[in-house]
Amino acid sequence: MLMTDKGTIKDDCIITKMSDAEFHVVLNAGCKFTDLAHIEAVKSSEFKGKDISIEVMDDQNSLIAIQGPKAALLLSKVLGLASSAFDDQNFMFADFARKYKSKPIIVSRCGYTGEDGFEVSVPH
């Protein structure tokens, strides 16, 4: 979630920690330019002199949302996995080790519909 300097919510992006030095950020498509500008401004003011880089990957990946009570079952079938493949993946956690047709994908368990669901980042 992007916050203003007053502690209010600027946008509801999803930030996932991949490692101590790397984060995966999914921005709201309609606000991506203002969100990127906000991130750059915070980086420039709050982290001046730190070795921080931002790599925009919107030309490489697409995001597919699978929502609803059967989302985990559907996604496991599409990926050719056991129906219990996502039983241990908690809400708001991402799995960076999944593949589809030998290409890496990112599976985040999140839902914006009030139902269980996933956002899957796949190569175009």
Image (cartoon, rainbow, N blue to C red):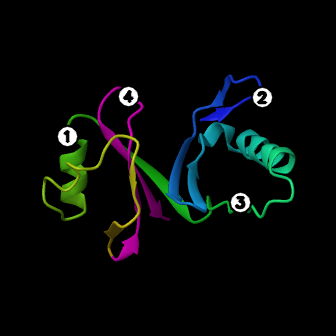
C-alpha gap between disc 3 and disc 2 = 21 Å
Residue at x 74%, y 45% (from the top left corner)? 39
In the image, residue 74 above or below residue 5: below
**Mark 3 vs mark 2: which is more N-terminal?**
2
Residue 51 horizontal/vertical position (percent): 77, 64
C-alpha gap between disc 1 and disc 3 = 35 Å
Residue 77 left/right relative to 9: left
In the image, residue 21 above or below residue 66: below
Mark 1 and mark 3 in contact? Answer it, CB < 8 Å: no
Mark 3 and mark 2 in contact? Answer it, CB < 8 Å: no
Is residue 107 rendered magenta in the image?
A: yes
Per the image, the residue denoted by label 2 is 5
Residue at x 23%, y 46% (from the top left corner)? 72
Per the image, the residue denoted by label 1 is 70
The type of residue carrying mark 4 is Thr
Mark 3 and mark 4 in contact? Answer it, CB < 8 Å: no
Residue 12 horizontal/vertical position (percent): 57, 33
Residue 54, labelled with which disc?
3
Task: Check the picture and name the quadrant holding the N terminus.
Answer: top right
